[in-house]
Every structure is written in C-alpha cells, then in structure tokens.
Image (cartoon, rainbow, N blue to C red):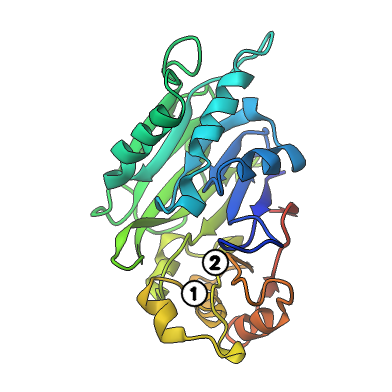
Amino acid sequence: MAKVAFLGTGSTGDPSRRSASTAVVTPGGDVILIDVSGGSEIVSAMRDAPLPWARLRAVVITHQHFDHASGLPFVLFWSAIAGKAPGAAVGPIELCVPGPAVEGLRAACDTFFPGLYTPWWLGDRARWHGCDPGQFLWALDLLDDGTSVTPPAIDHGPPATLPEGVVARIVTMAVSHGAPPMPAQAVRIDIAMADGSVRRVVVSGDTGPNLELGKVGPEPDLLVHEASAVASLGHDLDNAATIGHATAATAGRVATRARAKRLALNHLGVSWATDPSPAREEAAAHFAGEVLVPNDLDWLDL
C-alpha cells in the first residue's frame, strides 16, 4: 500500500509544529521526501515517523527558503551514514530542485559538510536534477532497479498506468512564490501499485493563489496544499498573495478544479495552527470532498 507521512505541517516560528515536510512511501517501501525542513528537524521527524534512511530514493525541494531546504545537508549526511551499515544496499538519491537553485544548494551542502561527496561518505550517490522552471511539466521516473530515467514528453493528463519497471514518477510545475519572486515548484508523485493502477499525490509547496495548479495533477488521490492565511480570522489576504502564499479558501478551490479526492492543508499559519477548524471550514466551503488538517507525524493510506 502507498502511504503519505506528514513529517511537518507548520510554518517558521511555530513552536507547536515542525516546518512543512511530506514523505511519500511506495508499496515497496521506497521513500520520496518533499521539502526537508528546519535543519535537524527533518532528522528527528524521520526518526519519529519512523522512516529508514536506507530506503530514501529522492528528495524534491519546492524552493530554497530555509524552512524548506535547510535540512538537505542533514539528509545527505544521514543517507551517507546509512550506506555504511553492514550489508547496506543503498542506491542513488535523486535531488530534484528548481534549476537556478542547484549550484547554491549543492555548495551549501558541501560548505556545511566538507568532503560529503568523497567516496568514503556519499560519493556519487547524490544525483542533482535542475528542474527547468520554463518547462510546463518536468518529470523523472524512478525505476525498480534503483536507477532513474527522464520519461518521454508528457502532458498534464493523469496516466492510467506507468511503464513497466517504473516505481514512481516525479512531476514538477513552476509556481509563483516569494517577494521578490524566486524559482519555486509544485510536485506530483505518481505511484505504481501492485495491481497496475496509479495513486497520485500533489503537493503545492509555497505558492500564491494559483488555480492553474490543478493542471499539475488532475484527479489526485490527495492534494496537499499550503494554507498560510484564513479570511475568517482577519488575515491580510493581499499581503499573503503578494509574498506568494495561499489561503485555505484557495486550497479548496484548487482541490475542486483538480477534482481531488481528498485535500490536506499544511504550512499552517502560526496564529491558527493550534485550532485549525476555521481553516477546515473555509476550505470546505469551496471543496465538497474530505478536508484534512493533519498533525505532525500523521499518516494517510492512499
């Protein structure tokens, strides 16, 4: 069975929740991380979930703000440690980041851990992929032999099946975030099931109001969408949009447009994270399906 683990569901500065980070686990146990929050936060989240470092296949960074990317040196360090365990059979780790951010993030990892890419540590297991922000949809297939391949040109239509040997497909789409704007992306994970069907998860990352986000993955089994602001709580919605964040209402509208089966709100605003009911109600006013507000370390079956 495919699963989703919410390793963190909050925003920067929220003492009640870890920063937003999501794990998708394939039926075979491979782990795909979407954002790696808050430095060592991601290490404790992986431990508490629990999720095995030795099964980490890919990390997708939606953008390079510190609350989404600063855990990357820790992730690569612990992946290197996992590879030293007796009998460990670890493979490459695919790192999918916005193209303009590749050099900076790679240099940051090397700065915080000199020698990380030497053979004794991680060696050449880290495979950096610069997702092209000018390309409508960028994709990478994870194969059952531990390798990866770029699939033929794809459109935004959801595949009924994945090619033989594909464990999961990672698809990214450029979104708008930040003031000034910075390269950012939403991500879709297509997961191959034992019966040949496909389960689909879409994670918005940080994004301003963007109904086009529904095109990254029509009919997902789960849409994980940020909800940094809630109108009923008097939040400054114009300011949220200016700095590239979305409301719970926007999340509901995107879920409806995408024909999602379920909607999970994350990146919860600090001012309402302890009582998510207003956000749930606001999203539900625009989406007829199930609206979830997960806590840290909650799991969902797909």
**Image point (37%, 39%), residue name:** 105
Q: CA distance from mark 1 to mark 2?
A: 9 Å
Is residue 50 shown to the viewer in this render? no
Judge left or right: residue 202 versus residue 233.
left
Query: Is mark 1 in CB contact (under 8 Å) with mark 2?
Result: yes
x and y percentages locating residue 121 in the rendered image: 50, 15
Front disc: 1 or 2: 2
Q: Where 262 falls versus 287 (above or below)?
A: above
> Would you call the spot at circle 1 few (<14 residues within 10 Å), some (14-19), or many (20 or more)?
many
Give the mark nearest the N terminus, 1 or 2: 2
Judge left or right: residue 132 versus residue 46.
left
**Image point (57%, 85%), residue name:** 286
Judge by depth and name the residue closer to the eye, 60 or 233: 233
Judge left or right: residue 93 versus residue 7.
left
Q: Which mark is residue 254?
A: 1
In terms of secondary structure, where does tag 1 sit?
helix
Image quadrant where one finds the N terminus: top right
Q: What is the quadrant of residue 262 in the picture?
A: bottom right
Q: What type is the residue that disc 2 sits on? A: His
**Image point (56%, 61%), residue name:** 12
Q: What type is the residue that disc 1 sits on? A: Val
Q: Where 57 falls versus 214 (above or below)?
A: above
x and y percentages locating residue 125 in the rendered image: 46, 21
Q: Where 54 falls versus 184 (above or below)?
A: above
Is residue 81 shown to the viewer in this render? yes
Q: Which mark is residue 225?
A: 2
> Would you call the spot at circle 2 few (<14 residues within 10 Å), some (14-19), or many (20 or more)?
many
**Image point (56%, 40%), residue name:** 32
- Disc tally is 2
